[in-house]
Image (cartoon, rainbow, N blue to C red):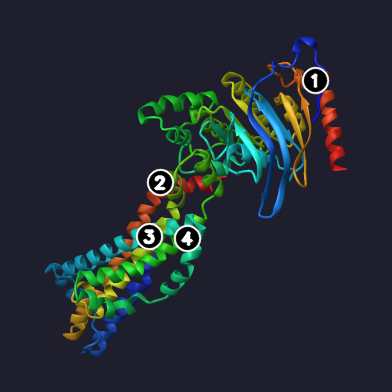
């Protein structure tokens, strides 16, 4: 598989080769007699921010669910830290797109964060401090006692992110997390996720249908093709970090990669 | 409060009945004047027989309810969570469920004889089915995403049920429980009327057989009042327990 790189200044050379944390080894999936994924091989490095794009039905979410252990491959292997994924694990957290359904409506914001702390077995006495810290991280300190239904969409998604961070995950799986949010909120959350990923060193697997979002966030963009899903191409993103909503998006490399990706998607849809 | 308007019709009927009974000089073994009913009811309340009978009925109803509800809940959760179990049980459930609970009186009578145990067994049977069916439906209606969240968090069956499944289904389970309370009272009184020498149903039969229509009507009204009171208490509890959550759900 070729990795086309956007040209980058020499000083921003690719990061040192990383030992892959997640490996897809000829992973294929058939569900109820339907071919979902053709054999896919893909390595994701520790601390890497990988974005996955492609038309609907191309298996973006399926890849994410395979990493999460919510699906098991029909053929091949998904390796996590060298061992085959056999089911969900607590150091892999998932941020779902439909935050309204993924939050517990009968628990307050604090209670929803607490759920993940309960899952990892944190003693009751230690939870309040950790909950307060996590809510502060996502800017919800003043809303700890509100129920999800009383929060805006952006706040609900922040809350879901806080709950995922409570697991102290090594891997953050994000399934079109900002697809349902307005543009301003989306940009704010993009920057928050970048900051969180940078400070925690977590590996992020980010599914989106927004090509610019993929370039803005990712170290690498994986483009999939549908029917059945397969990796069509990969693009390294060598834009400097920290990224900035204005300067990064105006950077010639950003625009060039954007052009390449748009052409590519148009081609693959033709 | 504008609820008083609802009282106009019943009050009018009571007055009309009183007037009619006095005008015709009613002397009957099956009917009684409202004033006689009130007197008989007050007397039965004061001498404690009515409350004693009420206690017996409620003990039997609630003991049966406790058994029927806990078993129905347990099996309902099982069938709601595991499709295989639901399919395996489908025929049995549909075969047993339609049996009218009072049709079990002869056989339960053979097993337990008269007394609390047979009444409790029948109430338990009668409440088990609606709780089972409604629990199964409530569990099946839980947002699948929530179950996925609990899987992703690595919850085992016990914690999944305690932290996700039961709280998510609770509002609907409470409605099922309210329904079961009504059924329990009806079935308990029915069993008492058909022969069990306990409670309000037996008191009703006793009043009928000793030709005291005033007491019979007083007991009838009292049974209605008890049922109404139970339902009102449960509605109040429901509003207290789920009021805020319901309000949140209704908000945009």
Q: Position of residue B78 (x, y in %)?
A: 43, 57
10 Å crowding of disc 3: few (<14), some (14-19), many (20+): many
The span from disc 3 to disc 4 (Cα, nearest Å) is 23 Å
Secondary structure beneath disc 3? helix
What residue is at 74 percent from the left and 16 percent from the top?
A: A14
Label pair 3/4, CB-CB below 8 angstroms: no
- Give whichever of B235, A60 is nearer the camera: A60
10 Å crowding of disc 2: few (<14), some (14-19), many (20+): few
The span from disc 3 to disc 1 (Cα, nearest Å) is 62 Å
Left or right relative to A247: residue B19? left
Secondary structure beneath disc 1? helix
**Label 2 in the same subunit as label 4:** yes
Task: List the residue tagged with mark 3.
Answer: B177
Compared with A126, B217 (above or below) is below
Left or right relative to A26: residue B27? left
The image's mark for residue A144 is none
Task: List the residue tagged with mark 4.
Answer: B85
- Give whichever of B93, A139 is nearer the camera: B93
**Residue B35 seen in this snapshot:** no
Please tell me which of labels 2 and 3 falls first in the chain.
2
Q: Position of residue B228 (x, y in %)?
A: 32, 65
Q: Position of residue B125 (x, y in %)?
A: 34, 69
Please tell me which of labels 2 and 4 falls first in the chain.
4
Q: Nearer the viewer, mark 2 or mark 1?
A: 2
Compared with B218, B81 (above or below) is above
Label pair 2/1, CB-CB below 8 angstroms: no
Q: Nearer the viewer, mark 2 or mark 4?
A: 4
Compared with A204, B109 (above or below) is below
Task: List the residue tagged with mark 1.
Answer: A250
Task: List the residue tagged with mark 2.
Answer: B158
10 Å crowding of disc 1: few (<14), some (14-19), many (20+): few
């Amino acid at each position: 598989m070729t990795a086309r790189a956007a040209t980058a200044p020499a000083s921003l050379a690719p990061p040192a080769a990383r030992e892959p944390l997640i490996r897809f080894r000829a992973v294929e999936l058939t569900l109820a007699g339907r071919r979902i994924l053709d054999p896919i091989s893909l390595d994701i490095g520790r601390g890497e921010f990988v974005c996955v794009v492609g038309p609907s039905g191309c298996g973006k979410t399926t890849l994410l669910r395979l990493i999460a252990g919510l699906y098991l491959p029909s053929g091949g292997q998904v390796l996590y830290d060298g061992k085959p994924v056999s089911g969900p694990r607590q150091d892999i957290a998932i941020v779902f797109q439909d935050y309204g359904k993924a939050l517990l409506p009968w628990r307050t914001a604090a209670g929803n964060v607490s759920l993940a702390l309960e899952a990892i077995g944190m003693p009751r006495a230690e939870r309040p401090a950790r909950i307060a810290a996590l809510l502060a991280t996502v800017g919800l300190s003043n809303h700890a006692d509100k129920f999800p239904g009383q929060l805006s969409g952006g706040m609900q998604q922040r809350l879901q992110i806080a709950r995922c961070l409570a697991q102290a995950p090594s891997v953050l799986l994000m399934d079109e997390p900002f697809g349902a949010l307005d543009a301003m909120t989306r940009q704010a959350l993009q920057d928050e996720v970048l900051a969180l990923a940078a400070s925690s060193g977590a590996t992020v697997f980010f599914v989106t249908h927004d090509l610019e979002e993929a370039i803005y966030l990712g170290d690498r963009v994986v483009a999939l093709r549908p029917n059945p899903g397969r990796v069509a191409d990969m693009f390294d993103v060598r834009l400097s970090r920290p990224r900035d909503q204005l300067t990064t998006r105006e950077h010639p490399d950003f625009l060039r990669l954007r052009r390449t990706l748009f052409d590519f998607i148009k081609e693959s849809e033709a | 409060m504008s609820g008083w308007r609802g009282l106009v019709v019943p009050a009018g009927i009571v007055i009309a009945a009183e007037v009619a009974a006095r005008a015709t000089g009613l002397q009957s073994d099956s009917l009684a004047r409202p004033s006689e009913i009130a007197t008989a009811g007050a007397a039965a309340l004061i001498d404690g027989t009515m409350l004693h009978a009420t206690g017996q009925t409620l003990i039997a109803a609630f003991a049966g309810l406790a058994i029927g509800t806990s078993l129905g809940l347990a099996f309902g959760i099982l069938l709601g969570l595991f499709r295989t179990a639901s399919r395996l049980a489908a025929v049995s459930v549909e075969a047993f469920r339609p049996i009218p609970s009072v049709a079990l009186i002869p056989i339960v009578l053979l097993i337990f004889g008269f007394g609390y145990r047979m009444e409790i067994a029948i109430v338990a049977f009668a409440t088990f089915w609606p709780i089972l069916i409604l629990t199964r439906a409530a569990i099946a209606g839980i947002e699948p995403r929530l179950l996925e969240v609990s899987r992703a968090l690595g919850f085992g069956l016990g914690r999944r049920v305690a932290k996700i499944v039961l709280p998510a289904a609770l509002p609907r389970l409470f409605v099922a429980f309210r329904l079961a309370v009504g059924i329990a009272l009806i079935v308990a009184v029915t069993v008492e009327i058909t022969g069990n020498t306990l409670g309000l149903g037996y008191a009703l039969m006793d009043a009928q057989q000793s030709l005291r229509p005033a007491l019979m009507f007083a007991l009838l009204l009292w049974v209605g009042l008890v049922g109404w009171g139970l339902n009102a208490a449960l509605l109040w509890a429901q509003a207290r327990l789920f009021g805020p959550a319901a309000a949140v759900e209704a908000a945009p």
